[in-house]
Amino acid sequence: MTTESAPAAAGGSDDGRTVLRDLVFAEPVGFRPLSLDLHLAPVGSPLIVFVHGGGWRIGSRRMFCPTMADDDPFGRIVAAGFTVASVDYRLSAEANSPAQQDDVAAALAWLAERAHEFGADTSRIVLWGESAGGTLAALVGLRPDAGVRGVIDWYGPSELVAMGEQLGNVHGPASREAEWLGVPAGDDAARARAASPALQVHADAPPFHLAHGLADSAVPPEQSELLAGALAAAGVPVELELVPGAGHMWQGEDVDRLGLLDRALAFARRVTS
């Protein structure tokens, strides 16, 4: 474990926050140890558990969103009053679904057991993921025993067969989804269904905040519309923000990324208040 003082936050002032890095939360047999980083807010703060993207193939818990690398998003979330745990999970070259969901769930359990050590209120947890991490956050948040207050899903795939059909690779063995599942989504309906949040929705699910760019060619915006529709049909509170001109990972010159961050944080405040 390493401890460090955070760099100056956006805006030039040093917020003095503490980051605890490389905390091992799971050691799956036959795999590498999995770690998380804790960005600490004051004692008693609610907890955001962040799940990185990367198509389940790549990615790092150190990166919140590639287009926001200069905006210090972790620091902004801490400044808003949330402790953040950014977590590892096994990538698709290491293990297939549902290992990744199990890893995120293991991080939640580890955090709950050690809440007294870092002072966050683990009775008030929000899962937040982007892209592939959004899918994992949604799947874990939909588990009956998840115990989270809400889920923030930025442009995550939600129905894998439908997305394969939208992208023309439903039977493609080299797609990101096929590598994650271990088989093309169109070749194993049961496996694809189990990894599709839109098909796992139930009436007792926590509230969701979804945001998706209308110019996203990697994950079509219809994926968030499908999930929002399923949640609404089940009576689950859901917010859906569709962003004109925004590509995947909020690419685009005129995208208000900090506004998107602020609106997600406003949701997190509401569900943890």
Image (tube, rainbow, N blue to C red):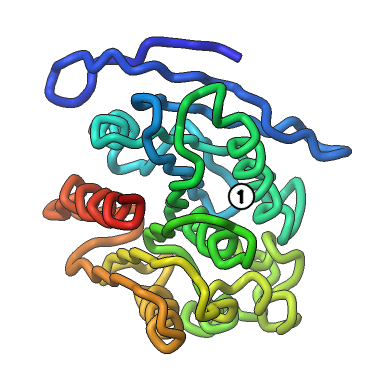
Residue 66: horizontal and vertical position, in percent?
36, 41
Report the amino acid beneath label 1. Arg
Where residue 256 sits in the image (x, y, percent)?
15, 52
Quadrant, the N terminus: top right
- In the image, residue 259 above or below residue 143: above
Q: Which residue is mark 1?
A: 57
Helix, strand or loop under label 1: loop
Q: Position of residue 87 (x, y in %)?
A: 56, 38
> What's the residue at 36%, 43% (across, down)?
65
- Quick one: 46 or 50, which is closer to the camera? 46
Q: Is residue 227 above or below residue 77?
A: below
Determine whether, in the image, residue 40 is placed left or right of residue 69.
right
- Front residue (pair 166, 239): 239
Q: Is residue 67 above or below residue 139?
A: above
Q: How many numbered marks have been drawn onto this rendered protein structure? A: 1
Q: Is residue 9 left or right of residue 39?
A: left
Point 66% across, 79% down: residue: 193
Residue at the outermost bottom position = 233
Q: Locate residue 240, reporting x and y percent.
A: 29, 72
Which image quarter: residue 82? top left
* Residue depicted at x 24% and y 71%: 242
Q: Residue at x 35, y 51 (%)?
A: 272
Locate residue 24: give its quadrant: top right
Q: Residues within 10 Å of mark 1 (few under 14, many from 20)?
A: some
Q: From the viewer's perspective, tell me whether residue 143 is left or right of residue 272.
A: right
Q: Nearer the viewer, residue 15 or 55?
A: 15
- Taking depth in this image into account, of 243 and 199 the one nearest to the observer is 199
